[in-house]
Image (tube, coloured by chain):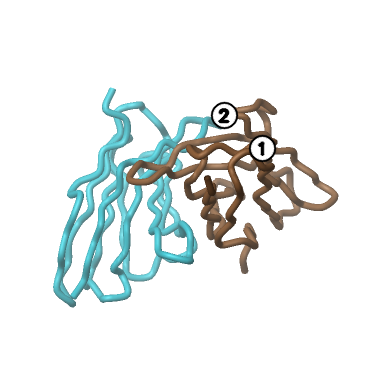
Chain colours: A brown, B cyan
């Protein structure tokens, strides 16, 4: 069963517009959630984790336990944000990823 | 520090052949894992290990074996390659509650 859901395969956003990448999870315990990013021809790297509550490259993500969501947001998209974004959940040492959303920033 | 090193970078196999994908990390991380990345499927966990001598199955373990005889190394063995195993394979490690550190990946084609 899918435990991390990223409903959008592709999201196209104009430069300067707000960005929201959706992530929903299913887990009955205390979740440990992450956002990873993969730029073209590079390895996956951590973007955010929910416990740090910090902003990286202008991105933020808030854990909403009631809605079981961990959506990734940025107020103003930049062209260098074009990449593949993965939401991930640590379920009892199994770190499970969603199917990913490709973010395409239009000029 | 080299971080997480995967070899080879590319490999072509014929159906039925076996091979081992190597993964080594020099960060003294206890946790290591293998994923496969396929278009439209994201990353799927194959096997993981929480320490030397301990391994466990992930989401898609069939057709793959792992062992963890040292903290540094976590090889992934394909017993009898099949075209369905054509994929990009990523090894990752972490210490405690730190984020996963990924290798550069191995692109495997099975014909």
**Picture quadrant of residue A3:** bottom right
Label 1: element kind: strand
Rendered position, B39 above or below B24: below
The one of A38 and B94 positioned closer to us in this rendering: A38
Quadrant occupied by the C terminus of chain B: bottom left
Which residue is located at x 45 percent, y 35 percent?
Answer: B94
Determine whether, in the image, residue B59 is placed left or right of residue B9.
right
The one of A61 and B70 positioned closer to us in this rendering: A61
Mark 1 Cα within 10 Å, few/some/many (few <14, many 20+)?
A: many
In the rendered image, residue A42, in percent from the top left (x then y), is placed at 35, 41
The one of B11 and A29 positioned closer to us in this rendering: B11
In the rendered image, residue A34, in percent from the top left (x then y), is placed at 60, 41
In the rendered image, residue B77, in percent from the top left (x then y), is placed at 25, 59
Which residue is located at x 77 percent, y 52 percent?
Answer: A68
Mark 2 Cα within 10 Å, few/some/many (few <14, many 20+)?
A: few
Which residue is located at x 26 percent, y 75 percent?
Answer: B82
Label 1–label 2 contact, CB within 8 A: yes
Mark 1 belongs to chain: A
The one of A79 and B88 positioned closer to us in this rendering: A79
Say yes or no: labels 1 and 2 on the same chain. Answer: yes
Q: Which mark is residue A74?
A: 1
Q: Residue furthest right?
A: A66
Residue picked out by circle 2: A57
In the rendered image, residue A63, in percent from the top left (x then y), is placed at 75, 41
């Amino acid at each position: 069963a899918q435990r991390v859901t990223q409903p959008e395969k592709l999201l196209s956003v104009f430069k300067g517009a707000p960005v929201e990448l959706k992530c929903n999870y299913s887990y009955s315990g205390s979740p440990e959630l992450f956002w990873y990013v993969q730029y073209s021809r590079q390895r996956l790297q951590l973007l955010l984790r929910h416990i740090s509550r910090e902003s990286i490259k202008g991105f933020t993500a808030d854990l909403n336990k009631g809605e079981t969501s961990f959506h990734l947001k940025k107020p103003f998209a930049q062209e260098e944000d074009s990449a593949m974004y993965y939401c991930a959940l640590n379920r009892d040492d199994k770190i499970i990823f969603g199917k990913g959303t490709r973010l395409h920033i239009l000029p | 520090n080299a971080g997480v090193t995967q070899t080879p970078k590319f490999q072509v196999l014929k159906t039925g052949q076996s091979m081992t994908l190597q993964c080594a990390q020099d960060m003294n991380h206890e946790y290591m894992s293998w994923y496969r990345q396929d278009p439209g499927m994201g990353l799927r966990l194959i096997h993981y290990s929480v320490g030397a001598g301990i391994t466990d199955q992930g989401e898609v373990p069939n057709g793959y074996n792992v062992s963890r005889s040292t903290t540094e190394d976590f090889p992934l063995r394909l017993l009898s390659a099949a075209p369905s195993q054509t994929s990009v394979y990523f090894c990752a490690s972490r210490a405690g509650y730190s984020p996963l550190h990924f290798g550069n990946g191995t692109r495997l084609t099975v014909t």
